[in-house]
Image (cartoon, helix red, strand yellow):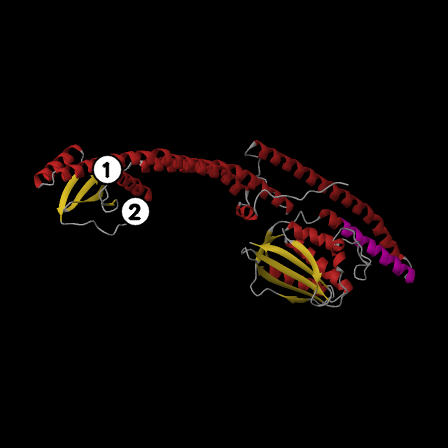
Amino acid sequence: MRLRLPKISLWPKFIKRSIPKTLWGRALLIIVLPIGLMQFAVTWAFFDMHWETVTARLSEGLVGDIVWAVDAYEADPTTQNMTRISEQAQKAMQLSIVYQPHKTLPEGKRPNPWAALDRSLKRALQTQLDDPFWFDTTRYAGAVDIRVQVDGGVMRVIAPRERAFATRAHIFILWMGGATFILTTISILFIRNQVRAIERLSHAAEAFGKGEDDPGFKPYGAAEVRAAAHAFLKMKARIQRHIEQRTTLLASVSHDLRTPLTRLKLELAMAPQDTATERMKQDVSEMAYMIDEYLAFARGEMQDTQDDVSINSLLTTLNDSIERSGHKLAVSLLGEDVTLSAREMGLQRALTNLIMNGFHHAKTVAVSAEIETRANTTRVLHIYVDDDGPGIAPDKRDDAMKAFSRLDAARNQNIKGVGLGLSIAQDIIRGHGGELVLDQSPLGGLRADIRLPVA
């Protein structure tokens, strides 16, 4: 007995929901995220190890000059001494020092968005200066205002900003940001070129699944993508060859069987008409119908051309055709007509199969259409074929759409036919990028729901 270990996810659910779902988004994330993290780490290291250190040294040097000026004035608090200090500070230290008698320090302070600047200067002032102080780094664009309370007033110092802080840090940030932008742009261009090749392969595969040909498709892109494209082309050629061989085989069989069937019809027409002859005519007609069904299933609708089809016109034409066959069909058209790019003969055949399948087992058959708008703003066309027959049990609906399927239930005895009606309809709908769903009908029988994407 094998022990099954619980599946452990290494990623939290909220991270999984945040990760892009497309290859383009994930590839871009793989490239851009490491670049962004690296740039952030380098910038952080620069500010932590270099910028703050340089700024601290500059602030300490500026505060040292201010301490000299304060000590020199307090040693000789005269106007002549203040004038001499101001001249020396302006000439040697680039400081503008003014003594304001009878003044006090301001109480308020405007906050600096870049708090690291204030922290560095405040730390230096607290460490070297014993007198009360106040400073403002936001009032002047190129200067710092520092005031110190001294005897009899306030000494105001206006210092160039570069004496207190390293003012060229933004250049480094611009260089880092510019490098990130250039690297990201190059990554986007290269990733987009690779993803475009995969998208092209996806569109070619989808077109082939709908029975369309894409003669302009050629393998390009990375080696792995080209290998996948070459494998797709080989698979496409094998499938087309298989379809052609199957069609040719059944067409030959059909042709060979039609000749003896024609002779039988002629002999039965010339034979004495009695009950046995009528039964043989019925058998021959049923054999001819089976041959046509086999051939239609083998041929599919691959030879039809794609064209713009009006749904209301299609349903109206279908209603006229059904009425000519002797049946009464209830048709409800769309309030606002839509046009699909589709194979008109294929859609007619799929709907005819579903409608006639309903008339074989029910008295009333109704066809209606509606447009559904889903949450992602995509629109889906629903064409409903409802009847009041016995229906099909939910557990047998998948089997009912298999080729050559004959259910034992009363509905699908397939007294006439070979069990290909639903299968042919399903293949045609899938070839248009849609799906065929069997469900319970509001009339009490079976509902065939044809769902087709609307551009």
For label 2, the SS is loop
Query: As drawn, is 307 to the left or to the right of 161?
Result: right
Image marks 1 and 2: residues in contact by CB distance under 8 Å = no
Q: Amino acid at mark 1?
A: Val
The secondary structure that most of the magenta stretch takes on is helix
Q: Could you tell me which residue is drawn at 76 percent across and 55 percent down?
A: 400
Q: Give x and y (percent) for residue 127.
A: 28, 38
Q: Nearer the viewer, residue 410 or 14?
A: 14
Q: Which residues are magenta?
A: 274-294
Image quadrant in which the N terminus is located: top right
As helix, strand or loop, the secondary structure at mark 1 comes to helix
Going by the image, does 376 lie left or right of 51? right
Q: Residues within 10 Å of mark 2 (few under 14, many from 20)?
A: few
Residue at 42% of width from left, 36% of height from top? 41
Instruction: Determine whether 17 is above or below 388 in the image.
Output: above
Can you identify the residue that label 1 sits on? 63
Number of labelled discs?
2
